[in-house]
């Protein structure tokens, strides 16, 4: 996976590169690719979705569940005197690295049981937005329009790697996981996903705290730590954020902040979870927990619709 991360970093470092050149970077294989450019007065970005069929995946008539990996980010860089990749680029880097890895192992006749659908956007010129304690790096379209483009109905469960370094909620160099979010409910992480994190890192698992504020659209003006669980607004599938974190607060637009081994382990974690989920060995949440919340408190879908509207 380290080679893939380094190749993606080299690729994205050229600000002329977007989704089409990345698609050409992938070796030939059975993957299908969808590219949707977007442009507004705030800039432009390329949305890209890459579906990797599994040996028992639904795209080929199988019944293994599909994992979505959404490389969440506002943008790769801001205009100015520092031309390098911003800290905010991490989610895109992880998503594209996982895609490159899956494409390469397929040429060696290796594939996962379930389909894997990787979705991200490549925004080479973002813009800053006010936020405490550091400005957010924002894409040229609001989250209410961006996340529906990233989410896909084929995703049975979603991992969302994203930079989350500008806070004091966690003091840890590496990556973490959030509690799973499904249909408005924030639940406890499943032991199997924490075990996967332990196997990948060789360390105790780190769980990032989130609140109800983090599952509201940015446009409502409620304070967010970051947006890694915002896809939950637009899907009934469980969503687990994979925040890339640091021991100290790091400005989202700061350059020179990419920790290569953290990117590598986060991308490797996403693939391992996808492998386990397709095999039935890894779960995102406890179904009994979700059923109990529904029975006792009722569905939260009306709350989701309120957030959307």
Image: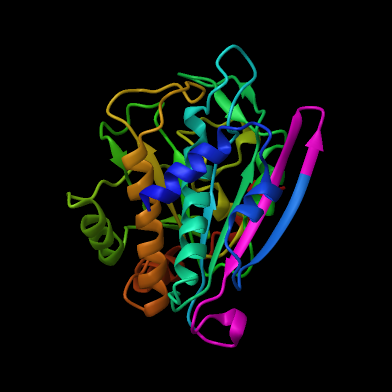
- Residue shown at 64%/58% (left/top)? 49
Q: Is residue 225 left or right of residue 21?
A: left
Q: In this orientation, which residue lies closer to the viewer: 230 or 94?
A: 94
Asked if residue 187 can be seen in this view, the reply is no
Residue furthest to the top: 81
Residue 162 place in picture, x, y as percent:
47, 42
Q: Which residues are magenta?
A: 38-63
Residue 277 figure quarter: bottom left
- Residue shown at 60%/53% (left/top)? 25
- Please say whether residue 136 is one of the residues in the magenta stretch: no
Q: Is residue 154 left or right of residue 133?
A: right
Residue 166 place in picture, x, y as percent:
41, 26
Q: In this orientation, which residue lies closer to the viewer: 64 or 8?
A: 8
Q: In this orientation, which residue lies closer to the viewer: 163 or 79?
A: 79
Asked if residue 24 can be seen in this view, the reply is yes
Q: Is residue 286 left or right of residue 204?
A: right
- Residue shown at 42%/42% (left/top)? 211
């Amino acid at each position: 996976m380290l080679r893939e991360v380094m190749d993606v970093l080299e690729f994205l470092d050229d600000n002329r590169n977007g989704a089409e050149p990345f698609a050409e970077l992938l070796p030939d294989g059975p993957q299908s690719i969808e590219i949707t450019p977007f442009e507004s007065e705030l800039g432009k970005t390329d949305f890209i979705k890459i579906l990797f069929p599994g040996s028992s995946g639904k795209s080929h008539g199988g019944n293994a569940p599909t994992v979505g990996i959404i490389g969440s980010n506002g943008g790769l860089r801001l205009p100015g005197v520092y031309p390098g990749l911003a800290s905010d680029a991490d989610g895109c880097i992880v998503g594209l690295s996982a895609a490159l890895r899956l494409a390469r192992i397929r040429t060696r006749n290796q594939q996962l049981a379930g389909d894997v659908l990787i979705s991200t956007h490549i925004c080479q010129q973002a813009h800053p937005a006010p936020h405490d304690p550091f400005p957010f790096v924002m894409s040229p379209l609001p989250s209410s329009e961006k996340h529906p483009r990233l989410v896909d109905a084929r995703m049975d469960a979603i991992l969302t790697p994203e930079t989350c370094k500008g806070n004091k909620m966690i003091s840890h160099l590496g990556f973490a996981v959030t509690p799973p979010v499904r249909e408005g409910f924030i639940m406890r992480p499943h032991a199997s996903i924490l075990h996967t994190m332990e196997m990948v890192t060789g360390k105790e698992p780190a769980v990032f705290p989130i609140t109800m504020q983090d599952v509201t659209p940015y446009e409502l003006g409620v304070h967010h730590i970051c947006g890694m669980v915002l896809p939950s607004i637009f899907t009934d599938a469980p969503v687990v954020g994979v925040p890339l974190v640091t021991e100290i607060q790091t400005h989202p637009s700061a350059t020179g902040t990419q920790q290569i081994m953290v990117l590598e382990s986060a991308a490797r974690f996403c693939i391992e979870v996808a492998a386990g989920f397709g095999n039935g060995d890894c779960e995102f949440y406890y179904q009994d927990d979700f059923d109990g919340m529904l029975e006792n408190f009722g569905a939260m879908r009306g709350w989701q619709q309120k957030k959307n509207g």
